[in-house]
Image (tube, rainbow, N blue to C red):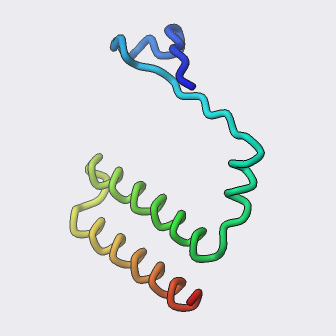
Amino acid sequence: MSVLIPGFLKAIKHPMVSVHISMHTSIEVKMYEELDCFERALQHFGTRVEIITAMEMADKIKTEDAYQQIKEELKELKKVRKNFK
C-alpha cells in the first residue's frame, strides 16, 4: 500500500515520492518466525552487505575495505551453511 504524505517529505520536491506502509498479516509474521539458522544467517548477510555497500558509496570506507568486509561476511555465511547441511 503506497500513501503520499506531502507534508512529511517537503524537502524532497518530486511528484512521485511516496511512503510505503507495510501491513503485516499474521501469515507474514508467522513466515518470518519460522526461519531456520541458515535463513537467519542469510538475512543477516544481506543486511550487512547492504550496510557495507552504502558506507562505500557514501565514501565512509574504501572500496578495498568494503570488498574485504563482504568477503568476511561471505566466509561466515559459508560456515553456517556447512554446519546446517
Q: Relative to 26, is 31 above or below?
A: below
Residue 47, position in %: x, y? 48, 58
Q: Is residue 3 left or right of residue 68?
A: right
Q: Is residue 56 left or right of residue 16?
A: left
Residue 63, position in %: x, y? 22, 62
Q: Nearer the viewer, residue 4 or 27?
A: 27
Q: Nearer the viewer, residue 68 or 23?
A: 23
Q: Is residue 27 left or right of residue 12?
A: right
Q: Relative to 85, is 1 above or below?
A: above
- Could you say which quadrant of the image residue 32 lies in? bottom right
Residue 83, position in %: x, y? 57, 91
- Could you say which quadrant of the image residue 21 lies in? top right
Q: Relative to 67, is 32 above or below?
A: above
Q: Relative to 38, is 60 above or below?
A: above
Say how many tags the image has: 0
Q: Residue at x 24, y 61 (%)?
A: 62
Q: Nearer the viewer, residue 42 or 62?
A: 42
- Residue found at the far top of this picture: 7
Residue 65, position in %: x, y? 28, 69
Q: Residue at x 47, y 78 (%)?
A: 77
Q: Residue at x 22, y 69 (%)?
A: 64
- Work out which quarter of the rendered image holds the N terminus and state it: top right
- Work out which quarter of the rendered image holds the C terminus and state it: bottom right
Q: Residue at x 67, y 33 (%)?
A: 23
